[in-house]
Amino acid sequence: MQYIHSVNFSRHARERKQNRGILRDGFNALIDYGTLYHAGRNCIACHIDRRAIALAKKEGTRIDRYRNYACIIAASGKIVTIEHVNRIPRHWRPMGSKGRVS
């Protein structure tokens, strides 16, 4: 789980990550366990939900602290923003059967 050094954050995403106190482990949890959605405008949303938390727990990782966090990834691979979402927006559409990054 050493993605954060190779990831290209937008200035906005860096500021949001810092403002919201999301550490390296939290971002890596988003990438490792987050459920993927089509978020519109050729972007992908990666969201930590109950299913992601259960999967991480099975693998011995505790990520419940990051529940309902999401990041938006542009088609170029750049992280656009990191946010807290209480409810999945209606325009997000699930990707694939499992929707996991890895």
Image: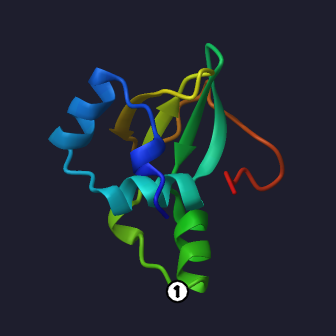
Which residue is rendered at x = 33% and y = 57% of the image? 24
Does residue 65 appear anywhere in the picture? yes
Spot the residue most to the top. 41
Q: Position of residue 51 (x, y in %)?
A: 61, 66
Give the camera-side residue of 50 and 10: 10
- Crowd tier of the residue under label 1, counting other residues whose Cα lies within 10 Å: few below 14, some 14–19, many 20 or above: few
Residue 4: x and y in percent read 41, 49
Q: Nearer the viewer, residue 1 or 43?
A: 1
Query: Does 90 sit above or below residue 51?
Result: above
23 left or right of 53?
A: left
With 93 as the anchor, is 56 left or right in this view?
A: left
The image quadrant of residue 59 is bottom right
At 42% from the left and 70% from the top, the residue drawn is 63
Number of marks in the image? 1
The residue to which callout 1 is attached is: 60
Residue 90: horizontal and vertical position, in percent?
59, 28
Give the residue drawn at x 27%, y 51%: 22
> Looking at this rendering, what residue extends furthest in the left direction?
19
Disc 1 is placed on an element classified as loop
Decide which of 12, 40 is in the foreground and name it: 12
Q: Is residue 15 above or below residue 54?
A: above
Task: Tell me, yes or no, if residue 68 can be seen here.
Answer: no
Hey, which residue is sitting farthest right in the picture?
A: 97
What residue is drawn where x is 62% and y is 19%?
40
Q: Amino acid at mark 1?
A: Gly
Colour logic: rainbow
Q: Is residue 58 left or right of residue 12?
A: right
The quadrant the C terminus occupies is bottom right
